[in-house]
Image: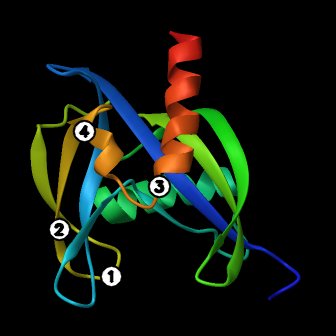
Amino acid sequence: MSEERVKKVTAIVARQGRAGIELLVFDHPLEDSGIMIQLPAGTVEPDELPGEAVIRELLEETGVHGQLVALAGVRDEEWEGEERRRWVYLLRTSEELSDEWPSTCDCGVPTRCYWVSFEQAEIVEPQQPWLAMARSWIRASS
C-alpha cells in the first residue's frame, strides 16, 4: 500500500423538500452497464485544496454550482486496497433545481441527477459512513 493516502472528497447538498430533508444524488454508470446511486464525489487534483475539489466535482457530476457551508468531517478509509483520506463537505446552491434533471458524468456518460430523502439515502452505497456523518452534522446544526 502507498505511504501517502489518496485525497478524496464527497459533497452533501441538502434541501428542504416534500419528503423533509432531501439529498442530491446521481446515477453513476458502471462498466457492466449497471448504475450505482451515489453522492457527488471524486479525487483532489495535485494543485487543489479539498474545498476547491468538492465544488469542482459537484459541478462536473451534476452541473450544479455549489458554495461551501461546512466541513462535516474527515475519514481515513481503504477502498479496493487503496488508502484514502476523505473530506466530506456540506454545500448549498442558490440555483432553483427541479426534482430531477439530466447531466453528463465527468466520465462523459449521460446520467440522471435527483433528490432522495434521508431515509431513502441508505441506498447510496458505499457512502453510508460519511452519509451518517453528514446526517449527524445536519441534525446538530438544525
Task: Choose the circle earlier in sequence order: 4 or 3.
Answer: 4
Snapshot colouring: rainbow
Camera-side residue: 133 or 8? 133
Callouts 3 and 1 close, C-beta under 8 Å: no
Q: Quadrant for residue 32, please give it.
A: bottom left
Element on which disc 4 rests: helix
Task: Choose the circle earlier in sequence order: 3 or 1.
Answer: 1
Q: Is residue 16 left or right of residue 14?
A: left
Q: Position of residue 91 (x, y in %)?
A: 48, 36
Q: Position of residue 20 (x, y in %)?
A: 25, 18
Bin the neighbour count of mark 1 within 10 Å (Cα to Cα): few under 14, some 14-19, many 20 and up: few
Q: Position of residue 110 (x, y in %)?
A: 15, 74
Which residue was labeled with disc 3? 127
Task: Choose the circle earlier in sequence order: 2 or 3.
Answer: 2
Which residue was labeled with disc 2? 111
Task: Choose the circle earlier in sequence order: 4 or 2.
Answer: 2
Q: Is residue 101 left or right of residue 138?
A: left
Which residue was labeled with disc 1? 107
Which residue was labeled with disc 4? 120
* Residue located at (66% from left, 37% from top): 71
Circle 4: residue type: Gln
Label 1, label 4: how many angstroms apart (C-alpha)? 26 Å
Label 3, label 1: how many angstroms apart (C-alpha)? 19 Å
Is residue 68 in sight in this rendering? no
